Image (cartoon, rainbow, N blue to C red):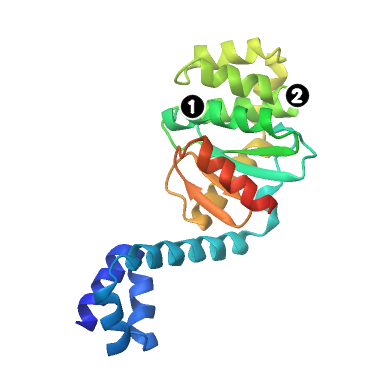
Amino acid sequence: MKHLLTVVIAVLGGFAGAAIWSLSGVGNSMTRDYLIENPEILPEMARAYQAQEAENRLASVGDEVRQPFPGAVLGNPNGSRTLVKFTDYACGYCRASVADVDRLIAEDPELRVVIREWPIFQGSEAASRMALAAANQGKFDAFYHAMFASGPPTAESIAAAAQSAGMDMEAAQVFGSSDEATAELARNEAYARQLGFTGTPSWIAGNAAFEGAVGFAELNAAVNNEAS
């Protein structure tokens, strides 16, 4: 039975958790009997383990991940609360989350939203580089919203979003191809991998790191947990 519980923990919480379970001695007969009688706590145990693992990974990257590329921030750049969003302009779920983030900003004047450009879909890197150029020109918010409103990134939609944001196109092309922009994209990729993110959008709020278009309520709860 102990081995069966180890398999259950592996399925629910990952094989690292199962190894800890198996070797720690907590799989004794009393614990086993309790879990058999109360199987509903197994998912809760798995969630707690996963949350702890996410917190450990977040601690390993340090506070730098919460510091924006200069200008790549929404809301109050000096806000006392921070939400980090890893995003890709070709990601439909990222586009769906724009309204949720805008609502958070509208309802919380102390919220700073740090955008980390993470182009993982084919064809989206050019849009991310233009976004960094927009940040460099103080036009990030306008470009970010125009780019998501335009649909999937193409040469035409990227140019249209940049023009809508009032960018200097010649300067943007130079900056987008710069070593500074390349280094930022590489940095964001490294952060995402270290945090165990597998796709966009991905988020950081306080000690929580999580993925997906989770909706306004969960984002709001994460930001409020940071504040509490």
Question: Residue at horizontal 32%, vertical 84%?
Answer: 31
Circle 1 sits on which residue? 95
Note whether 169 is above or below 199 in the view shown.
above
Instruction: Give the numbered dot on residue 137.
Output: 2
Which image quarter: residue 114? top right
Q: Is residue 5 above or below residue 45?
A: below
- Amino acid type indicated by mark 2: Gln
Q: Is 48 on the left-hand or right-hand side of 168?
A: left
Q: Position of residue 208 (x, y in %)?
A: 56, 55
Residue type at the position of mark 1 = Arg
Q: Is residue 39 left or right of residue 215?
A: left
Residue 82's disc number: none
**Image position of 91 with respect to 163: above or below:** below
Quadrant housing the N terminus: bottom left
Residue at 69% over, 50% down: 227
How far apart are labels 1 and 2 at the CA level? 23 Å
Q: How many marks?
A: 2
Is residue 28 visible in this depiction of the protein?
no
